[in-house]
Amino acid sequence: MFEAIAFYLFSFLTIAMFYITVTTSQALYALSALAAGMIFISAFFFILGADFLGAVQIVVYSGAVMALYAFGMMFFDTTRDVKEKKGNKYLITGLATLAAILVVVIVSAPLIGENISAYYPMTEGAGNTQEIGMVLFTKYLVPFELAAVMLLVAMISGIVLAGKKMDLSLTLMSDREIIEMREEKNKKVLL
Amino acid sequence: MEIGLNHYLVLSTILFSIGLVGVMRRKNLLMLFFATEILLNSVNISFAAISHFYGDLTGQMFAFFVIAIAASEVAVGLGLLIVWHKRHNAIDLDLMSTMKG
């Protein structure tokens, strides 16, 4: 009973939040709604007994990814309204629903088609975090290391891409220098 | 009322279609990134649900790797977006047509 109430409450909240994210014209509202939706999704993980996954969801998504977006948004002009394509609304919604149903059918076809058995069954008497540690550091050690390397590559590329001209400080420069830099930049844009 | 695997799969479908609608109708690249986050999260829900109802940890493992990929995608994507914004002062998708024939 409690599970059903929690499931319906959090599914309603998640769908509402993501709907706001997709439809709003304010970038700030979209960001806040997305962060709230991420938190509500972690509730499903806790209901499903995947405690560690829920904690990671909160830490990584609501902590790291959302903070990254918030810092990234400082570079963009987020106050003006976001313009949208004027397409056929019903066509878009229909296509999206069709594609989503197709994905779910593809994922669930092996579940319906045959009686599958657990590949890495959950051990009795161990907590979720303990189980995940045991499987992650034995069966999935190589993908885990590869993910670490991938994150390192992503970090370096983020620094290299976003860090260009970060050595200039607008607060320490005089007004004349800033104006000169702007003119130079405008020239570059015109070229 | 018992909540089964189908409930979670239906929820995942709904969230996935919301994300796809976002991907198709957004013109601003930042909003497009938000929509892709929704897509990744909806798939994570179905992974966790299948993992729970079949007593198998593989689904949760895949959800972890999806989260790792999402984090690195955001880092690289935002870096590229900042470079593009510095150069063109806009992040609209329609302006990125330099390879148009």
Image (spheres, grey):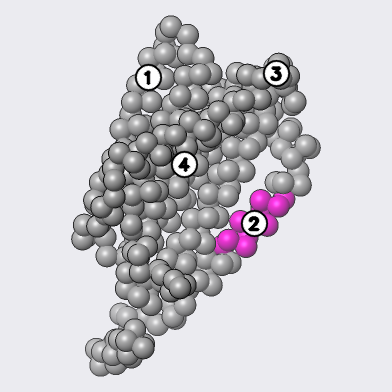
SS type, badge 3: loop
Picture residue at 47% right of the left edge, 66% below the top: B79
Which residue has dot 3 on it?
A114
Q: Do labels 1 and 3 share a chain?
A: yes
Q: Where is residue B66 in the image (x, y as percent from the top left)?
A: 58, 43
Give the number of the disc on residue A156: none
Q: Which amino acid does label 3 sit on?
A: Glu
Alpha-carbon span between mark 1 and mark 4: 20 Å
Q: Which chain carries label 4?
A: B
Q: Do labels 2 and 1 share a chain?
A: yes
Q: What residue type is labelled 2?
A: Met
Give whichever of discs 1 and 3 has the lower sequence position.
1
Q: Do labels 2 and 3 share a chain?
A: yes
Which is more foreground, mark 3 or mark 4?
3
Picture residue at 51% right of the left edge, 18% below the top: B6
Kindly report the secondary structure that dominates the magenta region of the rendered protein: helix
Which residue has dot 2 on it?
A150
Q: Is A76 above or below relative to A60?
A: below
Alpha-carbon span between mark 2 and mark 4: 21 Å
